[in-house]
């Protein structure tokens, strides 16, 4: 079956530094990927839609200059949290829509835990 | 995307069928209905999705009301591994932006 992989699964960074999280679709092409954030005991919150070859579309309230998204290929999207602060500590999850195949199936990655100290 | 309403929590006995309801009364004609589930500290797992007809796969069945304003996810024989938060969502074909609600926390009683 289709698999979406995220890396790293866990990362700890110092306040003020930047950290990059990768999201890969392993056996299918994905023109569109999505990035979510989830705080403990809360639901997933959509941050942005990542489109291959074009700029990402951010949800209201999400700072595009802080959460940089790059979707340079049909199998890879990256989320860079710039100038991270402790309040950015969260579980970040990506999803990808298969370009071809049974319609509309969206697959999620395993998630990446970010801890900013 | 149509707003969905689910019960906050449900309990079921192990090896019994489970029926998880979802209301999506403002669904449009081209919106798909998606079900995902999430275990703690894991990404959501695809369960099933459908448009108008009932759907079956190895994990579950999806029963869609004739007016499409509600649907029910059916786990035919619950196991302890089915304990999770189940999310029901809708999306428009071609715009698969899924908006998560609070979901239903399913507890399986041994």
Image (cartoon, coloured by chain):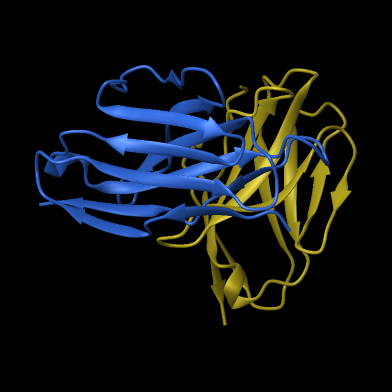
Position above or below: A29 against B86: above
Q: Is residue A86 visible?
A: yes
Position above or below: B58 against A26: below
Q: Position of residue B31 (x, y in %)?
A: 74, 24
For the N terminus of chain B, the quadrant is top right
The residue sitting at 22% across, 46% down in the picture is A89
Side of B3 relative to B8 (left or right): right
- Of the chain colours in the picture, the one used for chain A is blue
Residue occupying the far front of the picture: A72
The residue sitting at 40% across, 29% down in the picture is A69
Q: Quadrant of residue A113?
A: bottom left
Q: Position of residue A19 (x, y in %)?
A: 25, 44
In the figure, the yellow chain has which letter?
B
Side of A27 relative to A111 (left or right): right
Depth check, front residue: A79 or B108 = A79
Q: Is residue B24 visible?
A: no
């Amino acid at each position: 079956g289709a698999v979406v992989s995220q890396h790293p699964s866990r990362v700890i960074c110092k306040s003020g530094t930047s950290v990059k999280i990768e999201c890969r679709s392993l056996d299918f092409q994905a023109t569109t990927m999505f990035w979510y954030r989830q705080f403990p005991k809360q639901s997933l919150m959509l941050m942005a839609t990542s489109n291959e070859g074009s700029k990402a579309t951010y949800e209201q309230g999400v700072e595009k200059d802080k959460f940089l998204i790059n979707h340079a290929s049909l199998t890879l999207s990256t989320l860079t949290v710039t100038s991270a602060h402790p309040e950015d500590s969260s579980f970040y999850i990506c999803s990808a829509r298969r370009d071809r195949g049974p319609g509309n199936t969206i697959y999620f990655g395993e998630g990446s835990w970010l801890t900013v100290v | 995307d149509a707003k969905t309403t689910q019960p906050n929590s449900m309990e079921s006995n192990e090896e019994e069928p489970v029926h998880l309801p979802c209301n999506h009364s403002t669904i449009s004609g081209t919106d798909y209905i998606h079900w995902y589930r999430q275990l703690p500290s894991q990404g959501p797992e695809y369960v099933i999705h459908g448009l108008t007809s009932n759907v079956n796969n190895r994990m579950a069945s999806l029963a869609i009301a004739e007016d499409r304003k509600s649907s029910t996810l059916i786990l035919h024989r619950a196991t302890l591994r089915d304990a999770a938060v189940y999310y029901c969502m809708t999306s428009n074909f071609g715009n698969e932006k899924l908006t998560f609600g609070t979901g239903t926390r399913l507890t399986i009683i041994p």
